[in-house]
Image (cartoon, coloured by chain):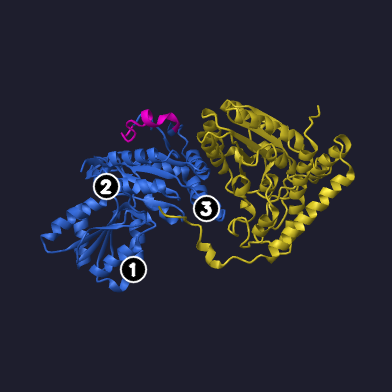
Chain colours: A yellow, B blue
């Protein structure tokens, strides 16, 4: 069944997916050239579930992400300039050059952090939902986490807490099949992480994470439930990571077959899948889609120029933001 | 002025701040049943939304407090025993301490984390911890350890109003000790210590309940003509270095009394600061009175000798006097 989502929303979904893809294509090159320091954790292949989940939220809803952090703020609608500048380690970066690739959080779009210790985001997202509820708002909180994080103790604690307190939080598992190199099938005792929801008395749903619209609809259902005061949900988006765990690790690791990778990249890439859907069944012309591609390219070029022109932080800035005001 | 116990002062501080600011709420294990007597009348006044019993999930509760704080609430999380904080160290370090910094000042974590310390009561190695020193090595956490009921009230109120996370340690040996508490509101600044006794021969920096031991020692030595100055840091982070160094400049001798394990203790840090920055004012060695590096045993005959006492402080002062 095809839901009518409206052209504007569909175009914006496509735009954000392309923003993530093209942004990361460029940062990989800039990283190789040495303009971007550190390690780089890219979301190539996961853009569908990221954007589908984010766009089911309102602008004022909260979101917590993880070390694979570039896609989440872009999916939630962040401007690119400060994100790019952050990766360059510049003063104008979204975190003033203190966060970098694993912590690309833009609080102006509702982010409450992209936190790089696996599993550390569950409690924060749960706490934001508690705050939203106590303040009498109908805001919800979305928690991105990977298959690996589902084995952390905070997963259990936070899902239980969210359930007993009926908190408006959506736990969105981005199951890309591997925790760095370790297959989820070896570390998770059940076929679907979503089935663990039963243990917390909340709904658990499996969705095709390569399908932006399916993910959007699943999260939308959970958001509706959360806003109605019916409590949390667990959604597992089955997805795949096209690149290594991080760029800059120095070598590739032999943990997945090239045929598996090739299959996902050629048949299950969320961006061509969505583009085909837009043109074939949702009334978009190729020209319209290509215009979005060009607009995104221009935005990314501008963000790179902005990052290059931005000043480096004063080394003394290393000592600011440890504390704020003292009462 | 009315006399209140340390616990009543804690209760009053929370209650006043919860009345003043609807963003403040309390959560923890067994807070509803008022296990230690700090939440008398809270449910009736504030309801179950703001006096929240929790599952035993210290790690997540710590991050829940952080998340709620990030969106504008002012949570107080009561861990009860300090040793239970160990379950939450990732959240305390990775989230609570670092979020303001990591995100370049985009957020703050105005939450208070209360932990009590019961030792000397045959609770054995896992239930007798005094963990405040362990947290001093992590930037971004404020650490408060009051030595009396009056300070506890003023410091806790400031902690609740502070825009940064505060770890608030309560020595349970002080819980029933009374102070005169004014009926008018007062706040005490975080990061500021206090000279609780003026003296000229030796400075005793005493942390939390150790202030009482230092006062006993000072009274005893006064009869012998030794004039002891006692400095109560009140906060360990930020630490009032100027107050300590100023006192050492005056006396030229220093003893630090701390019920932590000695290695990397608050006492060791203070001793190092004095050695680094106050060396030329010193007329003798810096002496620490702490707990030796063994675990806390159950049997009272083994446990009792491990902690600082007034006698040990007197011995240390004599040693410092040379």
Q: Is residue B82 visible?
A: no
- Tell whether position A76 is magenta: no
Give the CA separation, mark 3 to mark 1.
Answer: 32 Å
Q: Is residue A285 visible?
A: yes
Callout 3: residue from which chain?
B
Please report whichever mark, 1 or 2, sits nearer to the chain's N-terminal start: 2
Q: In what element is the residue under mark 3? A: helix
Question: Looking at the figure, which quarter contains the C terminus of chain B?
Answer: bottom left
In the rendered structure, the answer to whether residue B311 lies left or right of residue A311 reads left
Residue to which mark 1 is pinned: B275
- Tell whether position B42 is magenta: yes
Do discs 1 and 2 belong to a common subunit? yes
Which of discs 1 and 2 lies nearer the camera? The answer is: 2
Callout 1: residue from which chain?
B
Give the CA separation, mark 1 to mark 2.
Answer: 32 Å
Q: In what element is the residue under mark 1? A: helix
Which sits in the foreground, A192 or A122?
Answer: A122
Which sits in the foreground, B320 or A255?
Answer: B320
| Residue shown at 78% from the left, 48% from the top | A18
Q: Residue placed farthest to the left in the image?
A: B223
Q: Position of residue A59 (x, y in %)?
A: 65, 42
Residue to which mark 2 is pinned: B150
Q: Position of residue B69 (x, y in %)?
A: 49, 43
Do discs 3 and 1 belong to a common subunit? yes
Q: Which residues are magenta?
A: B35-49
């Amino acid at each position: 069944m095809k839901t009518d989502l409206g052209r504007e929303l569909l175009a914006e979904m496509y735009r954000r997916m392309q923003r993530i893809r093209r942004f990361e294509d460029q940062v990989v090159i800039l990283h190789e050239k040495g303009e971007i320091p550190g390690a780089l954790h890219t979301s190539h292949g996961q853009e569908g579930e990221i954007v589908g989940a984010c766009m089911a939220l309102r602008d004022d809803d909260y979101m917590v992400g993880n070390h694979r952090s570039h896609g989440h703020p872009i999916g939630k609608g962040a401007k690119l300039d400060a994100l790019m500048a952050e990766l360059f380690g510049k003063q104008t970066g979204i975190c003033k050059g203190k966060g970098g690739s694993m912590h690309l959080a833009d609080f102006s779009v509702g982010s409450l952090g992209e936190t790089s210790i696996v599993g550390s985001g569950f409690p924060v997202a749960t706490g934001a939902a508690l705050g939203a509820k106590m303040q009498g708002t109908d805001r919800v909180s979305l928690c991105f986490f990977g298959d690996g994080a589902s084995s952390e103790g905070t997963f259990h604690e936070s899902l239980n807490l969210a359930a007993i307190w009926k908190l408006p939080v959506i736990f969105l598992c981005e199951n890309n099949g591997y925790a760095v190199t370790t297959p989820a099938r070896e570390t998770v005792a059940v076929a679907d992480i979503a089935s663990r929801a039963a243990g917390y008395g909340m709904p658990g749903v499996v969705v095709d994470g390569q399908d932006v619209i399916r993910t959007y609809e699943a999260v939308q259902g959970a958001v509706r439930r959360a806003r109605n005061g019916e409590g949390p949900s667990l959604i597992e988006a089955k997805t795949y990571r096209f690149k290594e765990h991080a760029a800059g690790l120095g070598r590739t690791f032999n943990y997945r077959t090239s045929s598996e990778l090739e299959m996902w990249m050629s048949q299950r890439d969320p961006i061509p899948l969505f583009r085909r859907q837009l043109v074939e069944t949702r009334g978009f012309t190729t020209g319209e889609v290509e215009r979005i591609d060009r607009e995104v390219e221009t935005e990314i070029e501008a963000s790179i120029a902005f990052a290059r022109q931005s000043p480096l932080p004063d080394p003394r800035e290393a000592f600011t933001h440890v504390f704020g005001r003292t009462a | 002025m009315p006399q209140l116990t340390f616990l009543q002062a804690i209760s009053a501080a929370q209650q006043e701040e919860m009345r003043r600011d609807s963003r403040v709420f309390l959560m923890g294990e067994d807070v509803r049943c008022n296990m230690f007597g700090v939440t008398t009348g809270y449910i009736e006044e504030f309801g179950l939304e703001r006096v929240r019993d929790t599952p035993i999930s210290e790690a997540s509760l710590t991050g829940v407090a952080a998340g709620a704080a990030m969106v504008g609430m002012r949570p107080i999380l009561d861990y009860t025993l300090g040793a239970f904080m160990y379950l939450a160290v990732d959240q305390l370090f990775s989230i609570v301490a670092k979020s303001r910094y990591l995100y370049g000042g985009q957020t703050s974590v105005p939450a208070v984390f209360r932990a009590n310390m019961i030792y000397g009561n045959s609770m054995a190695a896992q239930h007798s911890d005094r963990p405040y020193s362990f947290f001093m090595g992590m930037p971004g956490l404020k650490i408060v350890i009051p030595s009396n009921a009056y300070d506890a009230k003023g410091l806790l109120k400031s902690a609740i109003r502070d825009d940064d996370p505060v770890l608030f340690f309560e020595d349970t040996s002080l819980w029933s000790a009374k102070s005169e508490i004014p009926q008018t509101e007062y706040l005490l600044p975080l990061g500021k210590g206090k000279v609780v006794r003026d003296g000229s021969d030796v400075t005793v920096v005493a942390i939390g309940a150790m202030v009482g031991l230092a006062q006993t020692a000072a009274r005893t030595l006064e009869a012998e003509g030794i004039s002891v100055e006692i400095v109560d840091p009140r906060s360990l982070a930020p630490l009032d270095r100027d107050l300590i160094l100023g006192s050492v400049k005056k006396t030229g001798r220093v003893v630090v009394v701390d019920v932590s394990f000695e290695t990397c203790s608050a006492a060791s840090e203070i001793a190092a600061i004095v050695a680094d920055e106050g060396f030329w004012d010193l007329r003798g060695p810096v002496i620490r009175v702490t707990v030796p590096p063994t675990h806390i045993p159950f049997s009272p005959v083994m446990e009792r000798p491990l902690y600082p006492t007034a006698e040990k402080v007197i011995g240390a002062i004599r040693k410092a006097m040379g």
